[in-house]
Structures are given as C-alpha cells and as structure tokens.
Image (spheres, rainbow, N blue to C red):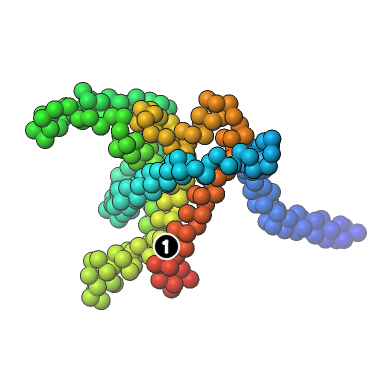
Amino acid sequence: MAKRKRRNIGALIAVKNHWIQKYLPFTLGSLSLVWQALFFYVPLLCVIVLSFTGDTPYAAFQGFFSAVYVRIIVRSLGMAFLTASMCLMIGYPFAYFLVFHTHRLRNLLLFLVMLPFWTNFLLHICAWFFVLDRQGLLSYLLQKLGILSGPLMILNTYWAIIIMMVYFYLPFMILPLYTALDRFDQRLLEASLDLGATWWQTVTRVLLPLTMPGIRVGFLLVCIPAFGEFAIPEFMGGDRTMFVGSVIKHLILGAESEVAGSAFTLISSLVLVIVIGMLYLIIGRLVPSRYEKE
C-alpha cells in the first residue's frame, strides 16, 4: 500500500510538472491577449461599428473621397515615410556604433536613448520651442557662426514638424536595430572583406539583408504612429497644415461628429495598411531569398 501510494503521488507530481511546463507559459501569456483584446480590438470594433451608424449606410464615407481629404492622407503618408526614413538614416549608424564600438558605455548610451520617455511629452515640445524659436538657441548659434544674417524662421513650418517627429520617434527605430545588430556575427563582415568584397558590397549584401528584420520592425514602429500623429503637427506646425490626426481630432472633439471621425479613421487606416503591405512586399523582393529563408 505504501509503495502504491508513493507511486500515485509520483504520478500526480509528474502530471503537475507536465501541466506546468506545457500550459503555464500560455496561461501567463494569455493575460497579454486579454489586455490587447480589451484595449485594442474592442475599441477598433467600436470604431468600425460607429462608422456605419449614420442615417444611411456608407453616408459617412461619401464626403471623404474628395480631393481635399485625399491630399491630407497623401500628406500624412509623406510625413510618416519621411520621418521613418530619417530615423533609419540616423538610427542605423548609431545602433551599429552602439553594438560594435562601445563596450563599457553601452548600457549608459542605451539608458540615454530611453531617458526622454521618463519625462512628459509636452515638456519636450516646450523645450524645442526654445530651440527652434526665431530668438532661440539654434538661431542664436547660427547667427554667431555667421551662417545666417538674420533670425531662423523655422518654427511653425513643415520642417519644424519633421525635426520634432524625428526626435520623438528615433528611439523606436534604434531599439529594434540594436537588437538585430546585437545578434549579428561580426566575423561575417571580416570574411566578406577578406574574400575581396568592397565595403559597399559588404554592407548591401551581408549587413543589411541579415539585419532586415530589425529594419522592418523599426520602420513600422515609426511609420504607423507617425501617420496618425496630431499633437506634434498642431504644436510645432501652428495648425496651418492638416494631417490625418488633425482631421480626426477636429471631427471627434471639435465638430463632435463621432460617426464622421470613425469613418475617416477607418478609411485612412485601410490606406495605411495597403501602403505598408505593398512596401513590405517590395522590400521582401529586394532582399535575397536565401537570407529570408535563414
């Protein structure tokens, strides 16, 4: 009886350990799925349903196919892609330097990259006002260096928006690139150069294809939220130019037309998904297939 009891207890312990190893990670991970469902899918479903609750079906969509709203969507796409491209051009060399040329200072530099997230976003905008103002720091330095003869007129312009957008979204590009480069074997660069490849061939045929997943993730993390940004264009651009986020804010908060705001949100989101999907396919064709399989 004692042996049978110990055998049964051992079997129960084995079943318990098997259940823990197999189902516990899924149980813990399911909490994130619940969170995502409550705060992403449910609001998204509400937006979709609300956009069709007008007097007649599709009535809220008809006014958004005019040339005015098409230009707004195209302008927002241009701003998003320009922001993501500039973040990529700045973030990739920085991430490369961070991974391969810093050792003791790597953690400190990563901390400095994340440090802006510790302060309020409005404080960043106020700080950039003092930098980009016609009597601000940048204008003062350029005049002292003799580059400009008068004040710098950049605040409340399109380029002020781009500067602030790049500043704010740059960490979203650096972190995925850092992760991709950190897993990259540096000996591949040495082997490519030893086999006679030029520096440009090594970068385009070895480094960029093998770090393309990080480039894609960083580009999407910057491009998607930049497309719907409304605070930076409104504060830094002086509300002179309308973007997608500005229109949605005006329709929902200003005009108090939730149906129209939901409809325009749905239309602009579908356009963004189509453009991102096309870009994803184009990049996939440009990358050699052997790197994709690996």
Q: Secondary structure at mark 1?
A: helix
Q: Position of residue 66 (x, y in %)?
A: 49, 43
Name the residue nearer the viewer: 231 or 4: 231
Q: Residue at 38% of width from left, 65% of height from top?
A: 209
Q: Quadrant of residue 288?
A: bottom left
Q: Residue at 42% of width from left, 51% of height from top?
A: 219
Q: Callout 1 environment at 10 Å: few (<14), some (14 to 19), or many (20+)?
A: few
Name the residue nearer the viewer: 202 or 28: 202
The furthest residue to the top: 135
Q: Is residue 279 above or below residue 189?
A: above
Q: Residue at 43% of width from left, 68% of height from top?
A: 285
The answer to whether residue 173 of the structure is visible from this angle is: no
Q: Position of residue 200 (x, y in %)?
A: 25, 66
The furthest residue to the right: 1
The furthest residue to the left: 146
Q: Position of residue 25 (x, y in %)?
A: 65, 52
Would residue 142 appear left or right of 77 to someone viewing this image?
Answer: left
Q: Give, as a three-letter code, the residue at label 1.
A: Ile
Would residue 193 appear left or right of 213 to someone viewing this image?
Answer: left
Disc 1 marks which residue? 283
Q: Is residue 147 above or below residue 280?
A: above
Name the residue nearer the viewer: 102 or 210: 210
Name the residue nearer the viewer: 191 or 20: 191
Q: Position of residue 15 (x, y in %)?
A: 77, 58
Would residue 16 appear left or right of 235 to someone viewing this image?
Answer: right
Q: Quadrant of residue 21?
A: bottom right
Image quarter (top left, top right, bottom left or bottom right) of the N terminus: bottom right
Q: Is residue 201 above or below residue 40?
A: below
The answer to whether residue 18 of the structure is visible from this angle is: yes
Q: Residue at 73% of width from left, 55% of height from top?
A: 19
Q: Quadrant of residue 166?
A: top left
